[in-house]
Image: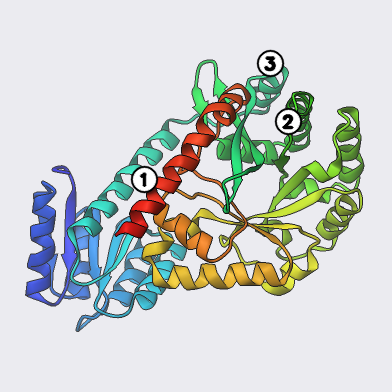
Amino acid sequence: MKKLKVLIVDDSLVQRNHVISLCKEQTITQIESAENGQVALDKLRVEKFDLTFIDLEMPVMDGVELVRSIAAEKLIESIIILSSKDPSLILSIGTMAESDGLSVVGTFQKPMKPEDLLTSLKRLANERVKEKKQQKQVPLTKEDLVSAIKNKEITLHYQPKLTVKGLLLKGVEALARWHHPSRGFISPVEFIDASEKLGLISELTEYLFDIALRQKAQWSQHGINFHLSFNLSPLSLTDKGLADKISQQVAIYKIPPKDIVLEITENAISGEISTAIETLAKLRLKGFNLAIDDYGTGFANAQQLSRVPATELKLDRSLVDNVATKPQQKAILKSTVNLSKDLQLITVAEGVEYFEDFLLLYKFEVDLVQGYYFAKPMTANNLNIWIKKELADIRKKLQQDLNEKNSN
């Protein structure tokens, strides 16, 4: 924190001093201030800062104009937006800033709280770690991916999907993991994106789906029955033979198609969707279940959802995380769950990490949950242990949390 250089932009001396004191509590010592947007802009053009606090209501140049100017001139990467206005307005300005390419590590009502700053600084630190990793990364080649598939370096982990009522194990989601012999852990985002760009996504999908089906068959042989969720790339939906290929793979392991949930991101159904709908319709006709994944991150609307023969809607963690403390997000989540029910879709909340969020999901009658509050993605062997030993403890802990909540 001592290395951070911050600029605080606010026309109120009281508010500037307040933020300065909060920064000093976090051992930030390189602090400068500006009383309006124009003064801030002049400073940013000649000095390098790591983080800028921006008030929205200021004379000469307001915070909105300052944000646009900073983004246009690429003067700084990370900002915190502050205002005495309502949270929805502050959040909308934050969305504008992010669309302009800025990293918004916090949007808060004034006066800023110590915990607000701490949360923002943690987010800033995490982003810097990610940036350093990305800078060190050597782009994956076609040979890297072909070798990984051939040598079975890419594997699957499984994350439980539990019923909100009773925490019964309803299914698992198969998630790809790659631990490279020399490069270590490689993010799924990185290698899946590379597979799509290098024209290897079909080979990777077939390879991973076979691993998932083989594991599903082993579980079934031991009397462990739940559905298996598997992610499909949007590019796969352009393959008119995909439904037949998947059916043939499933038939080899004698797994009923109804036990398989194929997940697609909502972005796969934006824009021209006729080819995607054809593929999805064939999959549904063959008995597979379909889930719209990461809902809330793109631009799908109710009309698009009604066109897709989906059976499940997965609410992205951006809608779920800390929802109990965010009124606007809570309203959006509630309306989305109601929409899903009206469309007769099973609702699944991803990224559940807090008890308070789970309570809200229970109140809204979400069907299924998955997230670190219950279990991280794990190997098949660890999942077997988790089912036998840990699931009962999780139910017990949840009941204790409920009892404690009710007693308070």
CA distance for labels 3 and 1: 32 Å
Question: Is the residue 11 above or below the residue 221 in the image?
Answer: below
Residue 260 visible to an observer of this rendering: yes
Mark 3 or mark 2, whichever is nearer to me: 2
Mark 3 and mark 1 lie on one chain; the one further toward the N terminus is 1
Residue assigned mark 3: 151
Would you say the residues marked 1 and 2 are in contact, meaning their CB atoms lie under 8 Å apart? no
Q: Amino acid at mark 2?
A: Ala
Q: Secondary structure at mark 2?
A: helix
Mark 2 surroundings within 10 Å by alpha-carbon count, few (fewer than 14), some (14 through 19), many (20 or more): many
Q: Amino acid at mark 3?
A: Asn
Residue assigned mark 2: 212
Q: Amino acid at mark 1?
A: Glu
Quarter that holds the N terminus: top left
* Spot occupied by residue 393 in the image (x, y as percentages of width and height): 47, 35
Question: Is the residue 399 above or below the residue 194 in the image?
Answer: below
Query: Residue 218 or 65: which is nearer the viewer?
Result: 218
Residue assigned mark 1: 127
Question: Is the residue 213 above or below the residue 395 in the image?
Answer: above
Identify the residue shown where x is 43% and y is 60%: 101
